Amino acid sequence: MSAERIDGTVVAERLRARVAEHVDALERTGQRPGLAVLLVGKDPASEIYVRNKRRLANEAGISTFEYFHSASVSEEQLLETLGLINDDPEVHGILCQLPLPDHLSEALAINTIRPEKDVDGFNIANVGRLATGQEAMIPCTPLGCLILLRERLGSLAGLRAVVLGRSNIVGKPMATLLLQNHCTVTIAHSRTRDLKSVCRQADILVTAVGRPEMVRGDWIKEGATVIDVGINRIPAPERGQGKTRLVGDVHFASASERAGAITPVPGGVGPMTIACLLANTVIACFRARGLEPPDDLWL
Ligand code: NDP
């Protein structure tokens, strides 16, 4: 079998177009959605992410506000900045780019962001709401994965899902979303015994481990849908000295032989993450205006 390629770039473009329509609608009510991004230190990868988020937000008509602190910023200063952004009525979504330097508590920073502006969905209030099936801001990467799965499969009810990885930002919320969508869910991690046979049971396999091409074709059930969240940079001497390339957690070529559908890396989950961030910002803006967010936002 040669798997269908699930093109996250195309789905994300459609979602961003939908976001832009709703930004127009909000502007007609006198409010343009605003996204604030807070970056601490000078991590080159984080700077690229922030630049991309700004460009795509602006293309969709969302205002962006950027706040930079040096890596030596004190916790007090950081929390003060977050407090100011919390109180800014032009800002509907706040993103604190992670990771933070070691001397700063990520949990404290995230929990300082008002839940209604927490467009990453990492604040403990949103985590609790999501886990208990209440209205929540849903973390962008798992939400993007869910949209791709629904695009491919329609209803997920009754399917056996394995989530490889148990981080707070991907693995755990992904498992929660799959459970809410009536899958039978297993969460696997570094202590899981016989990982290969666990993965082979999955109708849906979501991998978020950060281990280049760890999941091989013979880990995959015939016809499964595979969502590869991993983004790993590996040496690519074939492209020239010192060159690198991105790969996922899944070995794409061998997995494509068995899967029914699979996301590529790059061009799979990555673009969906940013599109969902923009959609969450629009949702936050609707709610701030006392309006019900539109049902048709999620394609
Ligand atoms: P974390 O490092 O926080 O979590 C990794 C998880 O993988 C842990 O639960 C860990 O288990 C598990 N794990 C690690 N090694 C193994 C192994 N050999 N066998 C089984 N399980 C293992 O990573 P994140 O969740 O933050 O990110 C995962 C990947 O997704 C990364 O490559 C990251 O770059 C990418 N990512 C991509 C995004 C996108 O937009 N596409 C967004 C966010 C992340 P344990 O808990 O036991 O240690």
Image: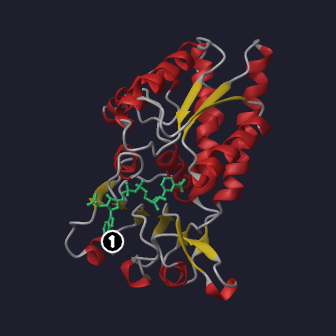
Residue at horizontal 35%, vertical 35%?
Answer: 105
The residue at 79%/25% (across/down) is: 24
Q: Position of residue 78 (x, y in %)?
A: 47, 27
Write down the residue under mark 1. Answer: 199
The quadrant holding residue 45 is: bottom right
**Residue 25 at what x, y percent from top left?**
76, 22
Who's the residue at 64% across and 34% down the image? 296
Where in the figure is residue 84, as x and y percent of width and height? 55, 16
Q: Quadrant of residue 123?
A: top left
- Crowding at dot 1, Cα within 10 Å, few <14 / some 14-19 / many 20+, comes out as many
Taking 102 as reference, is 280 above or below it?
Answer: above
Q: Is residue 116 visible?
A: yes
Left or right: where 222 falls relative to 69 = left
User: Is the residue marked 1 within 8 Å of ligand 1, measured from its CB?
Assistant: no
In this rendering, the answer to whether 264 lies above or below 281 is below
Taking depth in this image into account, of 204 and 130 the one nearest to the observer is: 130
Between residue 7 and residue 111, name the one nearer to us: 111
Q: Identify which amino acid the numbered label 1 is placed on.
A: Cys
Residue 188, image x, y percentages: 28, 62
Left or right: 38 in relation to 19: left
Furthest-bottom residue in view? 238
* Quadrant including the C terminus: top right
Compared with residue 236, is residue 105 higher up or lower down, i.e. above or below? Answer: above
Q: Is residue 113 visible?
A: no
- Circle 1: element type: helix
Q: Is residue 39 above or below residue 88?
A: below
Quadrant containing the N terminus in the rendered view: bottom right
